[in-house]
Amino acid sequence: MTKAHKLDCESVSDECRFIIQSENEQEAIELAKKHMKEVHEADYTDEELQNEHLQVV
Ligand SMILES: [Zn+2]
């Protein structure tokens, strides 16, 4: 079974239901970073996203 890296934006924002899921961790981080910046105007580092927001499912 392949693992996927998932970010559920609901854990960051009450209003946002955006979910990122990718088998490629780097891609998941890139998409998450882009979303956080464009939609939430927040800057996260790769490590913050990786450690605090990405789940492995
Ligand atoms: Zn969001």
Image (cartoon, rainbow, N blue to C red):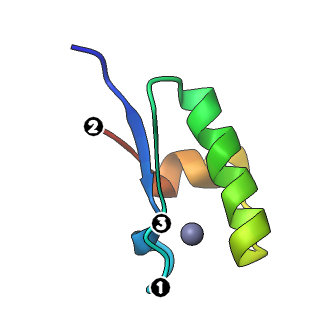
Ligand 1, seen in the image, is in the quarter at bottom right
**Residue drawn 70% across and 40% down?**
30
For label 1, the residue is 15
Quick check: 53 left or right of 55? right
**Residue drawn 48% across and 66% down?**
9
| Mark drawn on residue 57 | 2
Q: Given contact means CB atoms under 8 Å apart, are the residues at marks 3 and 2 in contact?
A: no
Q: Is residue 55 visible?
A: yes
Question: Which secondary structure, mark 3?
Answer: helix
Work out how far the residue at label 1 is from the one at label 3, CA to CA, in angstroms: 9 Å
Q: Is residue 11 placed above or below 48 in the rendered structure?
A: below
For label 3, the residue is 9
Quick check: 43 left or right of 26? right
Percent position (x, y) of residue 3? 32, 24
Please count the marks in the image: 3
2 vs 1, front mark? 1
